[in-house]
Amino acid sequence: WSGSNFGLKVLALIIALGLWVAGHRDTERAIEVPVEFRNIPQDLMVMDNRIDYVVLRLMGPRTLVSTLDSQTLKLSLDLGGAKSGSASFPLGADDFNVPRGVAIGRITPPVIHLRLEPVVKRTLAVTVRLSGKPAAGYMIGETSANPRTVSVQGPAEEVKRLSTIDTISVDIEDSRSTIKRKVRLTTDGKPLTISPDQVEVAVNVEEQQIVREFDRVEVQAKDFKGAYTISPQWVKLRLAGPKSVVEKLDLTAENVYLDVHGMSAGDHNVELSFNLPPEIRIVEQRPQRVRVRIVKPAA
């Protein structure tokens, strides 16, 4: 048995030695290391060629290389004191927190090229962007945003080109009434900061307005028991209002009439009186007055 135990101990030692050798055998590994920018001057922002990570080719013992974490190796570039324009940052092994025994074989890219641009802030009016069409017979009336202006901050070159800032599209397809909702403002992919970044939008969807001519509208004195004559007996009207109301309008003595109550015998120039739906407005009236001759006043 003692010989057998000795053999097992030797075997265990060989296995342990093998594992140790395997763990300390050199290996290679590519790892993506995030890049952060520190101390960016408040009046500048990073523009072209900004990258989020670099790739390190690491070499060393497997036990070390396999346990490395990308966050631990994070690259931090200090932009304190940077000026407007182009800037280059060559990268070397000293820029990364690599443990002893691990070597960096390659850094991709080896140099980070940046362009820094001045930052400006402007106050711009909000434009409400619409998509779709309202229901048949309806149209878009007044459209508003609250607040009407917002603060926009970003690269001087981009901000100076802007005249307004748009909302995301507000869908008005088949709408028949006013739309009110809170919507975001869009940067259209530009590196902008908008404050506030949402506005309250109101889109008034109204029935289409039309104008209709009534060439011969008979005029009468309403509820008058005396005797009278009118000249002319017909007037011309042009009325405007919602399409559904105007198209159904049928003018009678109840809608257009003369009020001659209390008038004495003789000639009078009398304005027309109207009893029309509240949505209707008078665009044109000819003549403005008619001549009424009271032959016999009402008793």
Image (cartoon, grey):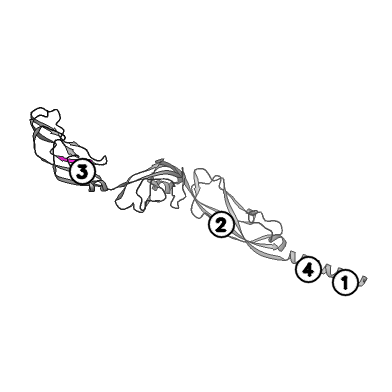
- Crowding near pointer 4: few (<14 within 10 Å), some, many (20+)? few
Residue identified by numbered label 4: 18
Which quadrant of the view contains residue 218?
Answer: top left
- In terms of secondary structure, where does tag 2 sit? strand
Left or right: where does residue 31 sit relative to residue 224?
Answer: right
Q: Mark 3 against mark 4, which lies toward the viewer?
A: 3
Task: Give the residue displayed 87% in from the left and 71% down from the top.
Answer: 7
Distance Cα–Cα, label 3 vs label 4:
102 Å
Which quadrant of the view contains residue 60?
Answer: bottom right
Q: What residue range appears in magenta?
A: 281-285
Label 4 is placed on what type of residue?
Answer: Gly
What x and y, as percent, mark residue 135?
33, 52
Outermost residue to the right: 2
Residue identified by numbered label 1: 7
Distance Cα–Cα, label 3 vs label 2:
75 Å
Q: Mark 3 against mark 2, which lies toward the viewer?
A: 3
Residue identified by numbered label 3: 239
Q: Main secondary structure of the magenta part?
A: strand
Distance Cα–Cα, label 2 vs label 1:
57 Å
